[in-house]
Amino acid sequence: MKHILFFAMALCTGTAMAQPKIVSNATINTTTNVIAPEEEDVSNIQGQGQEGTRGGMMMFRNFGDGETKSVTQVKNDMVKTVIKTDMGRSTIIRDNAAKLTTTLIEMMGNKTGFYSTDDEQAAMRKSMDSMMQSRSKDSTSTTKRGQDTSTVEVSYTEETKKIAGYNCKKAFLITIRLMGLVKDTAIVWYTPEFKVKNVSSVGGGFSMGMGGGGGASATNSMEKIDGFVMRYETKMRRNRTMIVEVTKIDLTKEIADKDFEIPKDFEVKPMKEMRSMMGGGGGQGAAGGQIMIRRDN
């Protein structure tokens, strides 16, 4: 009997030791690379505008393609991501305690921003979903989409490789949607050593100006992975592939509280005011931003 109890205790201890630790302080450098098909028929791209103009076809065709770098800082309930591109600089500051997201944009000498609560973002998504359904000509398919719920499965493997100094394992994140008719698969490399508080992964859609939904829906469920995601690869619209990889991660660097303060030279407004100025559109960049954020209710 004693041997059985000892074995059970040892098994429980081993299981507990295998759990990744939770990290509440981290600085993470990330590269997001969007790879376009070698040959692309631009005549099929809608809304391309006048060829050769800055707002026209060539700008739209290449929008989001190529490499984008970002830096994410995490300190307890605060998360900040800075994205630099040729067009300017964007900063997303997330206060998980207040359930508030602020997006700052520096472009062509202008410094503007907007903020929104989780409730406001949820209401906006609901409104946009309703609008998209009302525009659909096929009411039957609309009903099916509205009733459809996605499920996510994780398939772990024993394949390993080193990323940014950490030994990582390979997994497949499989999203099943449209009542089982469609499967989206993301290839994920993760370190089982730790998880980062409030952040399940970094990089991705917002770094290309697409809001939180740039890739396959599987990337929205990274919190299911038993560790921190260091690299993932997923398919996008228009036959593109998005590869996101952590290039450096520092869990010891001190992060000052002032790093999460809103600079005084920014004109920051509520998101609903920004949407009104834009004719009711946009705003999705604040919905979690580039980082995949776990929001605890």
Image (spheres, grey):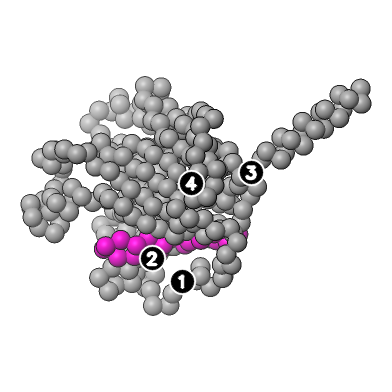
Question: In the rendered view of the protein, which quadrant contains the N terminus?
Answer: top right
Q: Which residue is mark 3?
A: 20
Q: Does 154 lie within the magenta span?
A: no
Identify which residue is drawn at 7% across, 52% down. Answer: 51
Which amino acid type is marked by label 3?
A: Pro
Which amino acid type is marked by label 4?
A: Ile
The image position of residue 183, as x and y in percent, is 39, 26
* Pointer 3 or 2: first along the chain: 3
The image shows residue 91, relative to residue 18, as above or below, that is: below
Which amino acid type is marked by label 2?
A: Leu
**CA separation in Å, label 1 and label 4:** 33 Å
Q: Which residue is mark 4?
A: 163
Q: Is residue 169 left or right of residue 66?
A: right
**Residue range highlighted in magenta:** 73-94
* Pointer 2 or 4: first along the chain: 2
Q: Which residue is mark 2?
A: 104
The image position of residue 151, as x and y in percent, is 47, 29
CB under 8 Å between callouts 1 and 2? yes
